[in-house]
Structures are given as C-alpha cells and as structure tokens.
Image (spheres, rainbow, N blue to C red):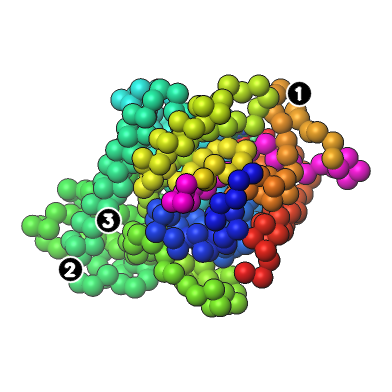
Amino acid sequence: MASHPTLTSSYRARANLPTSGPLASYLLSLISTKQTNLCLSADVETSAELLQLADAVGDSICLLKTHCDIVTDWTDRTSQALREIARRKRFLIFEDRKFADIGETVQKQYTSGHHRIALWAEITNAHVLPGPAIVTALEKAAEATIAKYNTAVHTEISASPRTQPPNGVDEDEEDDTVDETVIEPPMEVENEERRLSAKATDRKQSVVSVTTSISMRTESISPRPDAHDEDTFNLDTATELLRLGEVPFLRSLLLLAEMSSEGHLMTPEYQKKTVEIARSHREFVMGFIAQRSLNSEPDDNFITMTPGCQLPPPGQEGKKLGDNLGQQYNTPRKLILEQGCDIIIVGRGIVRAQDRQSEAERYRKAAWVAYEERIGKNQ
Ligand code: 5BU
C-alpha cells in the first residue's frame, strides 16, 4: 500500500486538518476521545432489539450503522429513541442505504417516504453508478434538511422574549394556549419535554418552551469542534466529551468504492472514478466504503469505513472466514494496520455473540491497538 500522511497521522491530527469537513472533523475527534474506531452494524429486525443493542454497545462505538428497512416495526419513534441513545452514549448514526438512482428519485428516497433518513442519520452512502449527479442531488437534499432545521431552531430562539435558559424548560415561560404558527423542526419530537413549537414574532411573545434539547442542539450547529492540544488529552473521557459538545446537525455521504463481497464488480477503474467524484465534493463526501485506504493525493483526508470484519474464533486464526453468501471477512488488524482503513464495521461478529457488550469491547480493543500500531503508539 502506497504511503500517505493520513496513514500515520492520529485521528485527532486529522480532525484538525482543513481538509476535514465539519462532520468528519467531529467524528475523528469523537473517535479519538472515546478511543473507538468501531462501527456496529445493527442488523436486527425489531425496534426494541435495535434500541437495546444500541444501548448495550453504545459506549464502545463511534458509529452505529442501520438498515432501517429491515426493522419490521420502524416508525418515527424508533428514530427518535435511537437518536436519544446516540446523544446519551455519543455516537453518530449511519444509514447504509446505498442509494443508486437518478438525482430526483434519491432526493425523495433520502428525505421522504416511511423512513425519512435525512432527518435522523448523520451519514448515509451511495453508489456512483448513476454518475456524479447522485452526489449533487443528495447534497442539496441534505442542505435543505439542515437549513430547515436551523431555521426552526433559530426562529424558536429568536421568538423567545428573553435569553434562553441555560438548562431545561423555564416553566414560567410556557404558554400552552399558543399553538398556532407552529414551526416544526425536521425531526418532529412528540415527547412533552422536547416541544419545539414557536409562534411568529409578531404575536405575543410568550411561548417558547425552550428545552434542554434545543439549547444543546443550537450549540451543536457550530461547525467544528475546538482544536485541542494533544496534551490536554489526559482528562477523562467524560470531560472530553463534554468539551467536544453534541453531535452537530450536519449530514455527510460515503461513496461505495469497494465492497466486501466476493466477485463484486467495482473494478480499479470504477474505484478511480469514484475517488475523483469524491474529490470534487469534499465538503459533503467524508469518505468511502472500501477495503483499503484510497487516500493518495496530498489533500486527501477521506475516512475509510470497512465492512467484512470478524475476529476468528480461538484456534482458527489465519483461516479465511466468510458466510457462504459471498461475505468475506478480514480481521481488525489486517484492515486497520495493513490496509489503512479507519473504521471497522462489524455486524454478526457482535450481534450474534452471547455477551454483545463484551464482544464489542473485544473488537474495539483489537481495532484500537491496530490503529496505535499503525501510527506509532506514543504520538
Ligand atoms: P456482517 O454481519 O458483519 O457481515 O455485516 C456487515 C454489514 O455491512 C451488513 O449490514 C452489510 O449490509 C454491510 N456491508 C457489507 O457487508 N459489505 C459491503 O461491501 C457493504 C456493506 Br457496502
């Protein structure tokens, strides 16, 4: 594998590069703070199991990957509850939707329908098979979603008659009689404590149930987490997470450049074109799904996320693993250390374990040790 500076840089150093978009920067900082480059692929079929899994494994992951269309009873409540766990356990959500249609259609698939992915998943992915317009279309839809959200929050805050309370609802400010001219954020939250309705500024300015969630979300709109010195990093994780702040309400895309399945048709030529498309959308495209790092130009700082990862059972080290349906597995060490990948994506390796929480920790440690070895530990 050709050497590239991103292969030997720490996640934190990469977070602070100008080539990291704001969400990528946040994710890299989060990885560094939580010391986890593990993404859980939560391929379960009910909302209850999804939420239980997210809660059990949340501390060990930087990212949770969903296939919302395999959850039989998915509703807006599922996404709301998942977001709440993500906020509490601090991880990002990645819907593995693999868009692959014309621009007009993917915009609708991304923002509408039963799942309304753009409202709750910070990250999604796309094939570039239809050509580069798929990226432009998704980027526009993402921008519209963010703008709508920011307008809703901004209107909410500016409609407030006085300074927003630092924490929690100020009961005195509530006026339940006002429910006209409701401005809904894109994520409609039914929870009583998270009422986001605001009335127009030309009306009596007394409503506005400004809640904790609003104040935190508003702060998170700030584009980039603060850069820290490497040596402030001995503070404990909780303090660091507080300092990092909430996940910003932003959206980003991964391009599929190389699949893990046997005999996939993504040739080196296709991959090359995929990287070129990513380079012309650096703000929106944070990286690739691939089996190796594709960073090659000086400005490349793409994040490589890699499915097809399992630890072999004891005694079977070195054996080629698969699932008899085309999936091919590599170890965290091979993917992170030898192939230069940044985040391992693990599904059944964790989901089918008896103790998912401790198995997730085993994967987290294996991938983290491989990363430390790659960058030369004491950096
Ligand atoms: P597994 O149980 O660890 O094999 O699950 C892998 C997950 O990653 C699963 O959700 C797949 O849909 C997903 N995946 C993959 O396995 N290979 C790929 O190339 C891509 C996604 Br893209």
Looking at marks 1 and 2 on the same chain, the residue that comes earlier in the sequence is marked by 2
**Residue at image location 69% in from the left, 28% down from the top:** 327
Dot 1, how many residues are within 10 Å of its Cα: few (below 14), some (14-19), or many (20+)?
A: few
* Chain part drawn in magenta: 297-317
Looking at marks 3 and 1 on the same chain, the residue that comes earlier in the sequence is marked by 3
- In the image, residue 239 sits, relative to residue 330, either above or below, namely below
Q: Magenta: predominant secondary structure element?
A: loop
Q: Which residue is mark 2?
A: 161
For the C terminus, give its image quadrant. Answer: bottom right
The amino acid type of the residue labelled 2 equals: Pro
The amino acid type of the residue labelled 1 equals: Asn
Q: CA distance from mark 3 to mark 2?
A: 15 Å
Q: Residue furthest left?
A: 202
Quadrant of the rendered image holding ligand 1: top right
Mark drawn on residue 153? 3
Whether ligand 1 has any atom under 8 Å from the Cβ at mark 2 is answered as no
On screen, residue 309 versus residue 289, left or right, reads right
Whether ligand 1 has any atom under 8 Å from the Cβ at mark 1 is answered as no
Mark drawn on residue 324? 1
- In the image, residue 111 sits, relative to residue 64, either above or below, namely above
**Residue at image location 42% in from the left, 65% down from the top:** 225
Q: Secondary structure at mark 1?
A: loop
* Rendered location of residue 330, percent (x, y): 73, 39
